[in-house]
Image (tube, grey):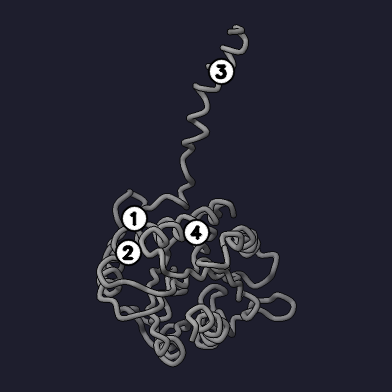
Amino acid sequence: MNKKLASLLLSFALFAPAFAFASPPVAATPQIKTDKDGKPVKSFVERAEMLKKRAQKGGFDILFLGDSITHQWEWVCGETNEGRKTPSKTGGKAVWDAKLAPLGAEPSGIGGDRTEHLLWRVENGLFDGKSDPKLVVMMIGTNNTGARMDPPADIAAGVDAIVKAIQQRKPAAKVLILGIFPRGEKPDDPKRVNNTKANVLIAKLADGKKVFYKDIGGVFLTKDGVLSRDIMPDLLHLNTEGYTRWADAVVPEIKKLLGK
């Protein structure tokens, strides 16, 4: 064999595994939420365990997965929630009870979650027992932007990993991915721009058969793309009006996907 060719083949053999087994980004690697010292965050562990046990009891057709924006479907706007000392300006329980609970929906969100945390939950019992949704509605990724300004491709990889983990456990279930909601007052807010770029990639995960994508972000914005505090008081989390708009935007899609 030609010495140069042999040398080239040897080089490829040595370096090819590095490319073939490149580590996925943090956003696509299942992780329990930890503090700055690397210790598990107690509030995450406790809520994740509660949500897992609740899901394993079954009795729902639709499972909503996400971060604090999903978590706060369980909050009552204007009241104190989960031991907080001051009334919350955000929350959508009344809307959930009126519009989504009758469809057989179950909320499963944890404040502060990034894609890797939701992936960990999916891989650690959330779909065990009697947990057998026909449809999973998920919206996740804004904390990847808010906490680390993850590259859009990393966020999309995290969402993709979650979808694949769900499909592995519940191949018959449909998955509706919602585009990450807008944040920040104006369209040029750096965090909103990052989320928008991530959404472009996330949308490509839909196959129109089992995985679907819908971007409802426009329902929260003015015609000029401005996000009002009358909908998101902190320009991130929703109040009753915001949750009403969310529900009204997704209920028709949910009914279509479930044939209702």
User: Marks 1/2: CA distance?
Assistant: 8 Å
3D distance between C-alphas at marks 2 and 4: 20 Å
From this viewpoint, which residue is outermost toward the bottom?
Answer: 98
Disc 1 versus disc 4: nearer the observer:
4
Residue at 42% across, 69% down: 173
Q: Amino acid at mark 2?
A: Phe
Image quarter hosting the N terminus: top right
Up/down of 163 relative to 184, above or below: above
Specify which label sits upstream in the sequence, 1 or 2.
1
Residue 103 on image: x %, y %: 42, 86
Check residue 44 in the rendering and tell me which mark sits there, or answer none: 2
First in residue order: circle 3 vs circle 4: 3
Q: Residue 65: horizontal and vertical position, in percent?
A: 42, 70
Residue 77 in the image: state x and y as whole percent: 44, 87
- Which badge, 2 or 3, is on the more N-terminal residue? 3
Of circles 2 and 3, the one toward us is: 3
- At 50% from the left and 69% from the top, the residue drawn is 139
Mark sitting earlier along the chain (2/4):
2
Numbered mark located on residue 9 in the image: 3
Q: Which residue is mark 4?
A: 159
Report if the CB atoms under discs 1 and 4 are less than 8 Å apart: no
Q: Are marks 3 and 4 in contact (CB under 8 Å)?
A: no
Question: Where 160 falls versus 17 (above or below)?
Answer: below
How many neighbours does mark 4 have within 10 angstroms: few (below 14), some (14-19), or many (20 or more)? Answer: many
**Left or right of 213 in this view: 122:** left
Q: How far apart are the two marked residues, 1 and 3, measured between alpha carbons?
A: 41 Å
Marks 2 and 3, how far apart at CA: 49 Å
Measured Cα–Cα span from mark 1 to mark 4: 16 Å
Identify the amino acid type marked 4.
Answer: Val
Q: Quadrant of residue 182?
A: bottom right
Decide which of tag 1 and tag 3 comes sooner along the chain: 3
